[in-house]
Image: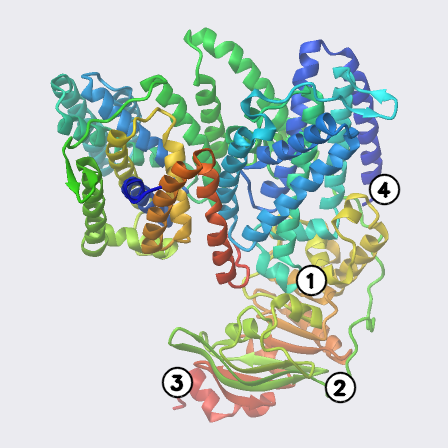
Amino acid sequence: MDLFVFLALLQDGITTGAIYLLLAVGLLIVFSVTRVIFVPQGDLLAYGALTAASLQLGQVPGTLWLLDGASAVALGLSLLGGRREALRGVLVWGLYPIAITAAVVILAPRQIPAVSILLALAIVTPMGPLIWRFAFRPIADASVLALLILAMALHFVLIGAGLVFFGPEEASAPALTDSSFDLGMLTVSGQSVAVLVCCAVLVLGLRWFFGATLQGKILRAAASDRLGARLVGIDAATTGALAFGLAAFIAALAGVLIGAVTPLSYDAGFDIGLKGFVAAIMGGLISYPMAAAGAVLVGVLESLSSFWASAYREVIVFTLLIPVLVWLSLRSGSPEDRA
Amino acid sequence: MTSTGSAHRWLATAATVALIVAVPAALPAFYVTLFGYVGLAALVALGLVLLTGISGQTSFGQASFVGLAAYATTLLTKFAGAPPIAGLAAGLAVTGTIAWLLGLVTARLSGHFLALVSVAWGISFFALFGTLPWLHGFNGIGDIPPLRLGPLSAANQRVNLGVIWSVVAIIMLMSANLLDSRMGRAIRTLNGARLMAESVGINTVQLSRAVFTIAAIYAGLAGFLFAHFQRFISPTPFGLGISIDYLFMVIIGGAGYLWGAPVGATLVVMLRDQFNDWIPRITGRPGDFELLVFSLMVILLLQRAPEGLLPLLLRLVRRPGTTPAAAPDTATPALATGTGTYQQTTPGDELLALNSMSRFFGGLAANRDVSFAVQASEIVALIGPNGAGKTTLFNVVSGVLPPDAGGIKLFGTDATHLRPRRVAALGIARTFQHVKLLGARSVLENVALGAHLSGRAGIVRAMLRLDRAEEAHLLAEARTQAARVGLGGVLHMPAGDLPLGQQRVVEIARALCLRPRLLLLDEPAAGLRLPEKQRLAALLRQLRAEGMGVLLVEHDMDFVMQLADRVVVMDFGQKIAEGPPARVQSDPVVLEAYLGGVA
């Protein structure tokens, strides 16, 4: 392998590493606030990419009908609740899906890449809160293990639905840019740069969100002490919806970004999500900077091993977990009681 | 086990044997194959019941263990011409070893780490099965020799079905034996009561690794049978999706019950079969619809009936009020007094000595320069306002928290950095301020946990029921101690159903089962009524007379002052007074701490 190939692989690795980083951040937000290990995040990534792809073809994506259907049920349930809840329900689960549906019907035939991407984000993001509302909120106090098993079942539900919506074929999301430029001997694609820029903007945005906004602080409070947050009046139902919303947005964004680089099929999200897990586990499911380092490491290692030993790519990436876990093991003190 | 219990056991065994012989002979061929798969799945699911339902860990990688054993036996029997029994041994050795190594990496971490990592190895092994050239990839390996034993060969699927279900029955019986034993009780503590488990001397890290290995070996057994039943293997049935199916079986059947495994396996395999038939007919297209519907059902079940279907079915069968009452306890020995079975001490022996011990939490000194001693035949009370550091001190002495400075001597030897398990083994038992019991298990079982260290029988002996003499001895000890603290009448009640004060008493009985030389009691009288308190005081005096040292934290001053030989007073992490009750009560420093200054 010469330097040129190495640099190209490195560029690939850093781009996918950035995607894994986004997913790791989403996983950490959801886990720390709700204790849910959000396996279906990868599926939402595929939904994001494929929704953008089908909008770009001028079609109405099946995910829109999923959003409309689930929103209608959520609307019905919130109308049964108190007046304030009903009002909020009408806004969030009534007007919003109607507006999005109208926008899709009007704008999709024009096939503008940026619009397709924005609409895809608008369709997939609310699926986070909907998933929380219907799947996890009813058993929010169950053990981490029970929530994890439910997440696994949900992953299969989304896969099954994804096949119905998008069919078995792979598709590409529209690229933000087709440009590329030369950097020394290496050709850098504009989309790679766009991925890194989006990733940086998102991370900075999240920093601001968690540091400066009330909603962000509420999430942090709920993450550091769930019971304490509840005692000072922070509603677990709201924080959960917020966390899942953020994670879904992040997943959808990651989807439209990576979907322009690699064509994805309806079931491709799980593997990508798993790499995000590997990164998140490197952070011990608590530390964001560690997870970021892990994500880039996973991306680069994957890219390099796909060149050297492509058949063993997955094995190599997952074997990386073992030293990390040994280290975490040695660091953990006496056995703690588990939630 | 009472005599009715063992009669039931024999009856169930006989009925099972009859079924295993009769059913395979009578079934249509299609169902022979189907029930073969059900039995294999039930084996894997049984391991998951032990792992997930009983010990609170889980694995999304069981199918890869099935695969490891299946490939091991295939390579040996087909390519090396070895007899199946060698394939069995190799398969179990491979799965057991790999599981043990994986457990080595994850057993100290929280349960969800094991689960996540299992996804990783599930995918890795699957990738290896598909890519290693000598495993023939996705073309698979056919013509695997059938099972044979001497001249008997099981090329007939009906014979195989009988073999499979016999193995299922044997494994179920062995698992039931395990759960009804010293190690079984210990395994139940892994699910959320590890701190308590360590305090009675259970090595929780080693034990959770052992349970994980057992689950893998059950899966390996299924893999061995699978290879010789289907006589063709490829990577497909060992993938992640299949692993998750096994877990769903357990969730659907009932993860907390051994019978949940066969019930869940039957339901899932049959349902999948029906779905594959019907859903394409309804929707007019094949595809992942059945997976969608099936997974939605699992989600609903997790939300509505997290215990699984088995308890629901049992509730339908068993009308309310007909639940069999626990058999009267004929074996309870007479109330033992002054048994002298505790580890021997001589009055005046120094049991515990704290030497300038300090423990900090960040900048907060929970204990600072605390020194005092507890001798044999002495009751020392540790008192102080809330937040004085009493519970921290208990945790340091019992090994839960290491001290940051100073030293601890137990029985004259340095014990500054001992883990709770070692402290327990030295003869120190404790209770907890927040009661730590297995709420769903009986009082007797909870108390017997305290006797863990006086038993030797391990998992294998328990499974083969070679532990009965020892088990009877342990349970007799538990009954003795339970009776001694006044719980003789509620031995078979779930511990969680007792009033909180009584639950504290269960903890005391559990501690006594350890036969300690030094007893640490954290607020033992809280929640007790006056007569119960008097009874407790009498018991503690009796223990003192037998040579035991007692260190207790208590807020009930009447109780403390009447009982204690010496009182140690703490405030803001420091010892502010020590002495006989009368002197401490009139100490101005103590009054200042409690009342904020005397008018």
Indicate which label's residue lies in the foreground, 3 or 4: 4
The amino acid marked with disc number 2 is: Pro
Q: Do the residues at pointers 3 and 4 share their chain? A: yes
| Residue type, numbered disc 3 | Gly
Q: Residues within 10 Å of mark 1 (few under 14, many from 20)?
A: many
Q: Nearer the viewer, residue A337 or B12?
A: A337
Say left or right for B364 vs A60.
Answer: right
Label 2: state its secondary structure.
loop
**Mark 2 and mark 3, same subunit?**
yes
Please tell me which residue lies in front, B52 or B317.
Answer: B52
Secondary structure of the residue carrying numbered label 3 = loop
Q: Confirm or deny contact between disc 2 and disc 3 (CB under 8 A).
A: no
> Could you say which disc has been placed on residue A53 in the image?
none
Q: Under tag 4, what secondary structure?
A: helix
Tell me which residue sits at (78%, 72%) in the image.
Answer: B342
Q: Quadrant of the N terminus of chain A?
A: top left
Q: Nearer the viewer, residue A276 or B56?
A: A276
Tell me the SS state at disc 1.
helix
User: Residue B9's spot in the image, x, y percent?
Assistant: 81, 35
B457 on left or right of B390: right
